[in-house]
Image (cartoon, helix red, strand yellow):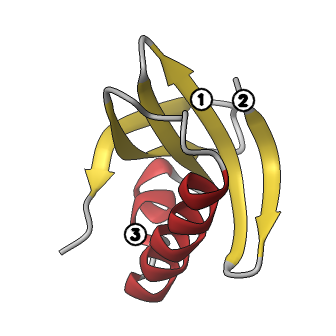
């Protein structure tokens, strides 16, 4: 884990983790159900996360040598979790 709730000019990134050079920017979404959480990540939020990630990578050029991905962790009130690896990409 490299960072939690990292604030940038473009917005906040919930979690940043790296394993074997693969950097993951992670958005955590909590709603009444996992399905609602999955649909709560809007296109506007994705753009904000992409912009924030660009800022982070510009400031920390050594991060993500093996690549970068955007993950989403879904949480419901019962504490069930679902991780979606590589949930979206810059189009």
Between marks 3 and 1 in the image, the one whose residue lies nearer the viewer:
1
Q: Is residue 49 above or below residue 63?
A: below
Residue reaching furthest top? 20
Residue 31 visible? The answer is no
- Mark closest to the chain's N terminus, 2 or 3: 2
Report the label total.
3
Residue 53 picture location, percent across and down:
54, 61
Quarter holding the N terminus?
top right
Position of 12 with respect to 44 (left or right) is right
Q: Residue at x 38, y 84 (%)?
A: 43
Q: Is residue 51 visible?
A: yes
6 is higher (above) or lower (below) than 1: below
Residue at (77% x, 37% y) in the render: 3
- Check contact, mark 2 vs mark 1: CB within 8 A: yes
Mark pair 3, 1: CA separation: 23 Å
Q: Is residue 55 left or right of residue 40?
A: right
Secondary structure under the numbered disc 1 in the rendered image: strand
Q: Position of residue 48 (x, y in %)?
A: 54, 79
Task: Give me the disc on residue 30.
Answer: none
Query: x, y (%) of residue 24?
Result: 47, 37
Looking at the rendered structure, the secondary structure element under dot 2 is: loop
Is 87 or 74 nearer to us in this picture?
87
87 or 2: which is nearer to us?
2
Q: Quadrant of residue 77?
A: top right
Crowding near the residue tagged with mark 3, few <14, some 14–19, many ≥20 C-alpha atoms within 10 Å: few
Most extreme residue toward the bottom is 44
Task: Give the crowd class for mark 1: few <14, some 14-19, many >=20 residues within 10 Å.
Answer: some
Which residue in the protein does label 3 denote?
Answer: 39
- Disc nearer the start of the sequence (3/1): 1
* Residue named by callout 1: 17
Q: Residue under label 2, please give it.
A: 2
């Amino acid at each position: 884990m490299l960072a939690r709730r990292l604030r940038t000019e473009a917005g906040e990134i919930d979690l940043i983790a790296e394993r074997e050079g693969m950097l993951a920017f992670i958005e955590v979404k909590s709603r009444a159900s996992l399905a609602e959480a999955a649909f709560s990540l809007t296109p506007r939020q994705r753009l904000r996360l992409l912009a924030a990630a660009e800022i982070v990578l510009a400031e920390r050029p050594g991060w993500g040598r093996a690549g970068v991905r955007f993950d989403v962790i879904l949480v419901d009130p019962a504490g069930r979790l679902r991780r979606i690896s590589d949930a979206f990409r810059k189009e």
